[in-house]
Image (cartoon, grey):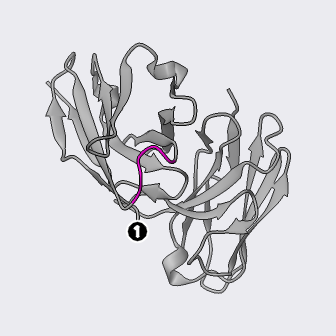
């Protein structure tokens, strides 16, 4: 059974960076695309980007271009999403999703001075 | 970018009601359309993939239809555990979600 376990909640100051991890168990990280989705409080789901293992390409939503970096460590079966230059509007729950149907539990990132 | 428009944004219904949610894509996405259910504090749960295929373990009261730009999620007989927010998602080119439909009593 595939499971994704994400790192714990983070509190950051404006301008800082945050790196969220997502560990895959029960499957091989390179089989499917890993996506990152966020959800601001009381708002809908927003796709941030994904890594496609077939071609090794990472695609970022235009909104996050230049601020987000998605990486994977296949040796530890862990994916990472780093978001820089944080602002209050980045306060959200961040999810990793492996394929369509396997999601992590979410990581709350709070940006506050 | 492909835009997804869901309607309604919220609806009130009763147990046993038939509920229909619609989703429209800004361009044709064939059947690359998926539906998720999300409850407060939880990750989204996949209900329907490829427009009309029921995800394993999802009750058969959920069904999906459509192709091209227009899609529908139907709950044939609403159950207490179905009160939640539903999102459509296109996976034709990257991902885009609809704005969500909150189903409440």
Q: Quadrant of the N terminus of chain A?
A: bottom left
Q: Where is residue B65 in the image (x, y as percent from the top left)?
A: 81, 62
Q: Nearer the viewer, residue A9 or A88?
A: A9
Task: Identify the residue at the far bottom of this view.
Answer: B16
- Judging depth in this view, the residue of A24 and A76 nearest the camera is A76
Residue at the image position 46 percent from the left and 42 percent from the top = A34
- Which residue: 52% across, 58% down? A101
**Could you say where residue A80 lies in the image, as x and y percent from the top left?**
31, 35
Q: Which of the two residues, A98 or B12, is positioned nearer the viewer here?
A: A98
Give the residue at x 71% y 40%: B92
Residue B64 placement, left or right of A4: right
Within the magenta stretch, is there residue A111? no
**Quarter of image, res B17:** bottom right
| Residue pointed to by mark 1 | A1
Q: Mark yes or no: residue B89 visible.
A: yes
Q: In this view, does B5 lie above or below A83?
A: below
Which residues are the magenta region? A27-31
Query: How many other residues sit within 10 Å of disc 1, few (<14), some (14-19) or many (≥20)?
Result: few
- Figure disc tally: 1
Horizontal and vertical percent position of residue A41: 36, 44
Residue A42 appears in the figure: no
Q: In this view, does A21 lie above or below B81?
A: above
Q: In this view, does A40 lie above or below B34?
A: above
Q: Which residue lies furthest to the top in this view?
A: A66
Quick one: quadrant of the C terminus of chain A?
top left
Question: Where does the image place residue A92, in percent across and percent down from the top left?
Answer: 33, 39
Q: Quadrant of residue B97?
A: top right
Q: Label 1: chain?
A: A
Type of secondary structure dominating the magenta stretch: loop
Which element carries disc 1, helix, strand or loop?
loop
Q: Residue at (83%, 44%) from the top-left corner?
A: B69
């Amino acid at each position: 059974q595939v499971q994704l376990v994400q790192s714990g909640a983070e509190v950051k100051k404006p301008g800082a960076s945050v790196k969220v991890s997502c560990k895959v168990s029960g499957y091989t990280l390179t089989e499917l695309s890993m996506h990152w989705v966020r959800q601001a409080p009381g708002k809908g789901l927003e796709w941030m980007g994904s890594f496609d293992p077939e071609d090794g390409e990472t695609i970022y939503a235009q909104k996050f271009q230049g601020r987000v970096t998605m990486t994977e460590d296949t040796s530890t079966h862990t994916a990472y999403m780093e978001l820089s230059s944080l602002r209050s509007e980045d306060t959200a729950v961040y999810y990793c999703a492996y394929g369509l149907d396997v999601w992590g539990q979410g990581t709350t990132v709070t940006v506050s001075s | 970018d492909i835009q997804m428009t869901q309607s309604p944004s919220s609806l009130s219904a009763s147990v046993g009601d038939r509920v229909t949610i619609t989703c429209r894509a800004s361009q044709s996405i064939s059947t690359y359309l998926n539906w998720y259910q999300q409850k407060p504090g939880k990750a989204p749960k996949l209900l329907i993939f490829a427009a009309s295929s029921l995800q394993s373990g999802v009750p058969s009261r959920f069904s999906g239809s459509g192709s091209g730009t227009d899609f529908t999620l139907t709950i044939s007989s609403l159950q207490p555990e179905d009160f939640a927010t539903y999102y459509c998602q296109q996976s034709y080119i990257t991902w885009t979600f609809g704005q969500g439909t909150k189903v409440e009593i």
